[in-house]
Image: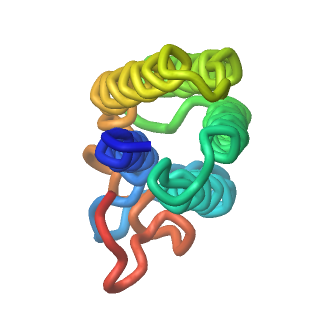
Amino acid sequence: MEGTDPVNKKLVAALSGSAALVLALTGCSDDSGEKADAWAKQVCDKVRPEVQKIQKANASIDEASPQTHSRADVKKTDSAAFQQVSAAYGSLANSIDKAGDPPVDGGAKIRKDAVKELRSLSSQYKGLKTKIDSLSTADNDKAKAQFSKGLEDVASQIKTLGESGNKALENLQKGDLGEAVANQEDCRKKPGAKKS
């Protein structure tokens, strides 16, 4: 379908931005206090698998280009990817919530804000799945135009989600807590890994 491949690329770029906010947990490098390290380990042990799920979802969307796949295949792939991203953000929220308040000044607020933002992202990606599921894949000009417009709307929403999600998680990479998080193997960026 002509004109929708750039939309698909925007979708992937926007999703990658959302994954970047999760990778915000992977910042600095020095040592920190034992309590902060213990808290960070609890969280970071759960981060890597969820980030990998988000990256896998991004890759599946990228591969399901409307230029090379039917609208039905694109719809099915995007729907499954949004479900996967929604579940991953939900799991991340639960991991941070279960770890309790990080042992730093303002730890309760940092945890509460991060959990709230991740749960919101999970809910909003679930909404995007519903939106994708509602798109018609009928083989007529009106349905084709609506499908293309629907993909554009979803890409725009994802970009907004990625931008809004960064704020709460930025606090997880500051000061002693950021250093403790950075010390955890599962929260470190792999050498040569692309920044999303």
Q: Which quadrant of the structure image shows residue 72?
A: top right
The residue drawn where x is 61% and y is 16% is 131
Instruction: Look at the image and tell me in which quarter the N terminus lies.
Output: top left
Residue 30 in percent (x, y) is at 29, 70
Q: From where the camera sits, is residue 67 visible?
A: yes
Would you identify the image quadrant in which residue 96 lies? top right
Which residue corresponds to the image point at 68% horizontal and 32% vertical from the top-left? 90
Question: Is 77 on the left or on the right of 22, as rendered?
Answer: right
**Up-down: is 96 above or below 144?**
below
Q: Position of residue 183 (x, y in %)?
A: 43, 69
Image color mode: rainbow
Please say if 54 is above or below 146. Answer: below
**How many dots with numbers?**
0
* Quadrant that contains the C terminus: bottom left
Rendered image quadrant of residue 107: top left
In depth, the one of 152 and 140 nearer the eye is: 140
Q: Is residue 45 above or below residue 142?
A: below
Taking the spot 59% from the left edge, 58% from the top edge, the residue there is: 60
Residue 99 in sight from this viewpoint? no
Residue farthest along the front direction in this orientation: 140
Left or right side of 158 for 27 = left
Between 44 and 137, the one lying in front of the other is 137
Residue at figure coordinates x 41%, y 36% from the top left: 104
Q: Nearer the viewer, residue 112 or 192?
A: 192
| Residue at the far bottom in the pictured view | 191
Q: Position of residue 126 (x, y in %)?
A: 66, 22
Residue 24 in picture, x, y percent from top left? 35, 49
Vertical side of 167 occupied by 11: above or below: below
